[in-house]
């Protein structure tokens, strides 16, 4: 959104140099950081924030604001400097405390929406992919609520490193295919990497690459504010496709000996170089200096945002007054009521794969959570994660709720995060558990930001069978559980699957939900409903020993306990979510695991991590090797994960203890 006023070149250059100076000073004071990118992209940032970006520093989380993502997060001081100058709640002291303990100005941007930081970036490519998800969210919600309530753009700064990472190819391909016309990226084409010139490893025709996957592209001088403004305007006018502005810049612009060199990338410039820049720019010898007029320069852009928000509030009030249904629908998307799932009624004793149980409740979830949106990496028939109404999200149907990500697991992960960060939607992504390896960086970022992304993984153990060890997860459960802020749900049966979804939907945190390929018995959980919410609960009481099991091994543990009943009274504990169990009061945990009883675990995966529950004398039955290609039943026999095999292990352990 551009103002009709001509660019005041003198004011622009003063503002851009202020961004450069603040970045240099902060990096030098911290003796750590990346000054080169902020200096090179300062002109691009000044034009964007002063003339195009629609944000309100007084209300940073206003729903219909433009989103800005700094994918090249190593240049974080660019973002902090601009936010400070625009009046967001980042202070001069915060700039001085760059990269220090407890400061909001971390080395790489960390998700703080109330400060104007829309996501955590730093791992290159993550912002590139996540911003695609934000644009998808805008397109979908625009269809639901119309232009009057949802009509904004997503902007991102990206670097050569972002474009080298494979995630950019995955998400650029999908964004072009979907025709995301409100997605604008600015590429910092400074031709310098840490190791030297980018042509050491990167020599492709970027414009041709993006043009080939359906993007509008334009190449400009990244230090010409008039050309920058015209390029941004042209990008915003390309309504049927995403845009890439390829801006030729100079890393460390103005540094007398380090401009256009790798030495400007990731280290302080040093006092002599900074002094030389100050002389060249006729800049006062004063750290963190902000000249008169610079805040006023950026304030013109922020007034545009304030007016836009005020206008939006008027439209929202008028729309909700005219139709109470609008207010109800808005609340259902943005402030949903607690969800209670009923399910179709699962018959105890019947055999049903937990992925199929999930499929049986998916339409109910979709009805009760209108903001549910997501899909699979070309495996929807296997993961059973499809909504029967609403159709597929597509260029000509942005109101569709079923996303088709193609064989692009990493793209799926970043897009799900973007949908979650945008707000108003509850996104999920689904694939086989072993392929979580392809999307782990995005999963980790969802945990780091503590956002409500839902990760659905089926075929979650060696019991997927004949596809063999390449498709059979072993270490994945332990790895997911090691991730802070991540709740991992491995339901034992259809009832636990239903409760797992109910718990996840009523939390605002990331979660992993796992489903079996093979059928497992529907358990008789009479009187034990609700146990999933506490992470673990007693399914069968006993006073000789405790066996903790998860997922498909819960029924195996119950069978083993039955076989040992004459000689040993075994308590069987189902632990669908270890993280929730560890959050329970100590009294409850003692009640479930007993006091002083020997404890064993049974799970079809790595035993790593289980000793924290079983203790030094405990028994951990699992799989500390890769799997094999064979029918699931044969695998269970060979790896000792049948009821009789587990009973024998338990008997030897108990009789010998």
Image (spheres, grey):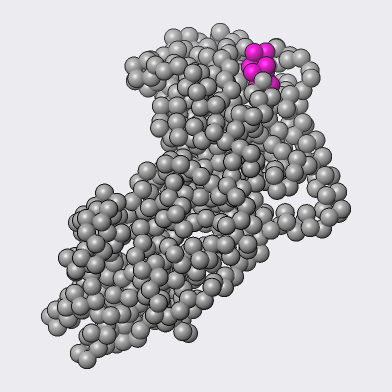
Above/below status of 233 relative to 365: above
**Could you tell me how many numbered marks the image carries?**
0
Q: Is residue 220 visible?
A: yes
In the image, is 27 to the left or to the right of 543? right
Magenta residues, start to end:
226-233
Q: Quadrant of residue 344?
A: bottom right
- Residue farthest to the bottom, as pictured: 566
In the image, is 426 to the left or to the right of 12? left
Identify the residue at horizontal 52%, vertical 15% (top origin).
249
Above/below status of 448 relative to 624: above
Please say whether residue 231 is one of the residues in the magenta stretch: yes
Quadrant showing the C terminus: bottom left
Please say whether residue 47 is one of the residues in the magenta stretch: no
x, y percent for residue 306: 77, 36
Identify the residue at horizontal 42%, vertical 41% (top origin).
407
Q: Is residue 584 visible?
A: no
Q: Quadrant of residue 198?
A: top left
x, y percent for residue 139: 65, 41
Identify the residue at horizontal 35%, vertical 59% (top origin).
460
Asked whether 596 or 602 is in front, the reply is 602
Quadrant showing the N terminus: top right
Q: Quadrant of residue 325?
A: bottom right
Identify the residue at horizontal 44%, vertical 64% (top origin).
356
Asked whether 275 or 601 is in front, the reply is 601
Asked whether 277 or 119 is in front, the reply is 119
x, y percent for residue 505: 55, 62
In the image, is 626 to the left or to the right of 364? left
Q: Main secondary structure of the magenta part?
A: helix
x, y percent for residue 419: 57, 46
């Amino acid at each position: 959104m551009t103002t009709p006023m001509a660019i005041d070149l003198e004011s622009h250059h003063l503002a851009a140099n202020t961004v450069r100076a603040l970045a240099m000073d902060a990096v030098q004071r911290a003796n750590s950081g990346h000054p080169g990118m902020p200096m090179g992209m300062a002109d691009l940032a000044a034009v964007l924030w002063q003339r195009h970006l629609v944000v309100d520093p007084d209300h940073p989380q206003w729903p219909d604001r433009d989103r800005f993502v700094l994918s090249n997060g190593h240049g974080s001081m660019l973002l902090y400097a601009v936010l400070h100058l625009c009046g967001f709640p980042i202070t001069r002291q915060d700039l001085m405390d760059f990269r220090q303990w407890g400061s909001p100005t971390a080395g790489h941007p960390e998700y703080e929406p109330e400060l104007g930081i829309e996501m955590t970036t730093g791992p290159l490519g993550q912002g590139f992919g996540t911003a695609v998800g934000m644009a998808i969210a805008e397109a979908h919600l625009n269809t639901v609520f119309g232009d009057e309530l949802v009509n904004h753009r997503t902007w991102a700064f990206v670097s050569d490193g972002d474009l080298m990472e494979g995630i950019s190819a995955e998400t650029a391909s999908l964004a072009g295919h979907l025709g995301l016309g409100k997605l604008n990226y600015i590429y910092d084409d400074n031709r310098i990497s840490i190791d030297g010139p980018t042509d050491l490893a990167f020599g492709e025709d970027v414009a041709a690459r993006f043009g080939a996957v359906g993007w509008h592209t334009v190449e400009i001088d990244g230090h010409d504010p008039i050309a920058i403004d015209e390029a941004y305007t042209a990008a915003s006018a390309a309504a049927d496709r995403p845009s890439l502005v390829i801006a030729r810049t100079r890393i460390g612009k103005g540094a007398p000996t380090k401009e256009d060199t790798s030495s400007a990338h990731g280290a302080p410039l040093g006092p002599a170089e900074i002094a030389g820049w100050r002389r060249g720019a006729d800049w006062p010898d004063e750290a963190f200096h902000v000249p008169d007029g610079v805040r006023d320069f950026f304030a013109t852009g922020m007034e545009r945002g304030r007016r836009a928000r005020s206008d939006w509030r008027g439209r929202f009030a008028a729309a909700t007054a005219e139709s109470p249904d609008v207010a109800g629908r808005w609340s259902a998307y943005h402030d949903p009521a607690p969800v209670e799932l009923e399910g179709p009624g699962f018959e105890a004793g019947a055999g049903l794969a937990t992925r199929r149980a999930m499929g049986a409740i998916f339409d109910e979830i979709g009805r009760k959570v209108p903001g549910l949106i997501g899909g699979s990496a070309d495996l929807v028939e296997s993961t059973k994660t499809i909504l029967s109404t609403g159709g597929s999200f597509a260029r000509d149907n942005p109101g569709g709720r079923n996303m088709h990500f193609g064989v692009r697991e990493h793209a799926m992960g970043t897009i799900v995060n973007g949908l979650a960060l945008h707000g108003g939607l509850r996104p999920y992504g689904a694939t086989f558990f072993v392929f979580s390896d392809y999307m782990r960086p995005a999963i980790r970022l969802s945990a780091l930001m503590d956002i409500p992304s839902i990760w659905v993984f089926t075929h979650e153990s060696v019991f997927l069978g004949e596809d063999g060890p390449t498709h059979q997860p072993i270490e994945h459960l332990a790895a997911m559980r090691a991730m802070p802020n991540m709740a991992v749900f491995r339901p034992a049966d259809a009832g636990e699957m239903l409760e797992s979804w109910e718990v996840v939907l009523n939390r605002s945190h990331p979660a992993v939900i796992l489903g079996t390929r093979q059928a497992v018995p529907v358990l008789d959980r009479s009187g034990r409903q609700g146990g999933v919410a506490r992470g673990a609960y007693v399914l069968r009481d006993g006073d000789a020993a405790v066996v903790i099991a998860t997922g498909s091994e819960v029924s195996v543990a119950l069978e083993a306990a039955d076989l040992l009943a004459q000689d040993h009274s075994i308590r069987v504990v189902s632990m669908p979510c270890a993280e929730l169990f560890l959050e329970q009061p100590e009294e409850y945990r003692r009640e479930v695991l007993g006091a002083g009883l020997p404890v064993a675990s049974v799970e079809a995966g790595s035993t790593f991590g289980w000793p924290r529950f079983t203790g030094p004398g405990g028994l951990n039955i699992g799989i500390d090797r890769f799997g094999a290609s064979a029918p699931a039943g044969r695998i269970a026999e060979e790896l000792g994960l049948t009821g009789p095999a587990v009973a024998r292990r338990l008997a030897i352990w108990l009789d010998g203890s």
